[in-house]
Amino acid sequence: MSSRNHKIKAVVLAGGKGRRLAPYTQIIPKPLMPIGDKPILEILLRQMKRAGIRDVTLTVGYLADLLKLFFRDEKHLGMHINYIQEKKPLGTSGPLANVEGLDNTFLVTNGDVLTTLDLKDLIAYHQSQGAIATIATHKRKVDINLGVVELDGSNQITGYLEKPSINYLVSMGVYVFEPKVLQYIEKDEYLDFPDLVLKLLNAGEKVSGYVFKGYWEDLGRPDDYQRATLDFESMRSQFLPEETE
């Protein structure tokens, strides 16, 4: 599988401003936020390399020069890194239309994902499904700390739930696509992933979900970031097993 994955390219969405992590992200792009002794993006790139991926494109915008400076020496990662500069915000899927050479199965990730997901397994699952796209998903429980009242059309109470919990499958910000997906993305037009997925479904395309039960954290908010930093230190060998081999 690893040798096959040498042909698979990856695109990392690294152009966002990370407003929810302000004030940290006013001076450093979110993909360079440190997790232990490494930026989150370097951890992600090392996981891609372990999966056999050697060609990565970073779509950059906000504080792009810092990203380019940090990864200017590609040799220590053993990967080829390209950059696509966003001249205007294009959303989470719009930038894909500007990436050249996506003529085989390709991986797309957000630049701030901390997970133990085995990318080889995700890619193999996608290829076994015959889908145009596969979304890595994770189960999340949302606790509602209030009493939830249910009403009918005449405002009569039909149910009452005290502080219920609701389970959702959420997108992990990790996707595998076939080149055909690019036919649904207009060049230089703003498009987010939810809208792209709806486009695909409305066109009758097959979109698969990969349910991952291991560790995943989105570094969107300060408390998420702090928790992920502690988890990385205690579980380091699970995120970067090559360091102990």
Image: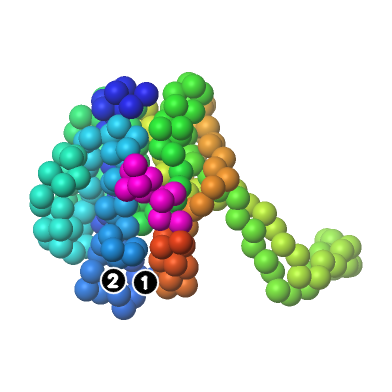
Q: Quadrant of residue 196?
A: top left
Question: As displayed, is residue 179 above or below residue 235?
Answer: above
Q: Residue at x 49, y 28 (%)?
A: 125
Residue highlighted by disc 1: 21
The part of the chain drawn in magenta is 235-245
Residue 240: within the magenta?
A: yes
**Pick the front one: 183 or 240:** 240
Q: Quadrant of residue 212?
A: top right
User: Which residue type does callout 2 highlight?
Assistant: Thr
Residue 211 appears in the picture as rendered? yes
Instruction: List x then y, in percent, for residue 122.
Output: 45, 34
The quadrant of the rendering that contains the C terminus is top left
Residue highlighted by disc 2: 25
**Pick the front one: 101 or 117:** 117
Q: Residue at x 85, y 67 (%)?
A: 160
Instruction: List x then y, in percent, for residue 44.
Output: 33, 49
**Pick the front one: 183 or 11:** 11
Residue count near mark 2 (Cα–Cα under 10 Å), binned few <14, some 14–19, many ≥20 = some
Q: How is the image coloured?
A: rainbow
Q: Is residue 221 left or right of residue 79?
A: right
**Pick the front one: 240 or 55:** 240
Residue count near mark 1 (Cα–Cα under 10 Å), binned few <14, some 14–19, many ≥20 = some
Q: Is residue 165 left or right of residue 152?
A: left
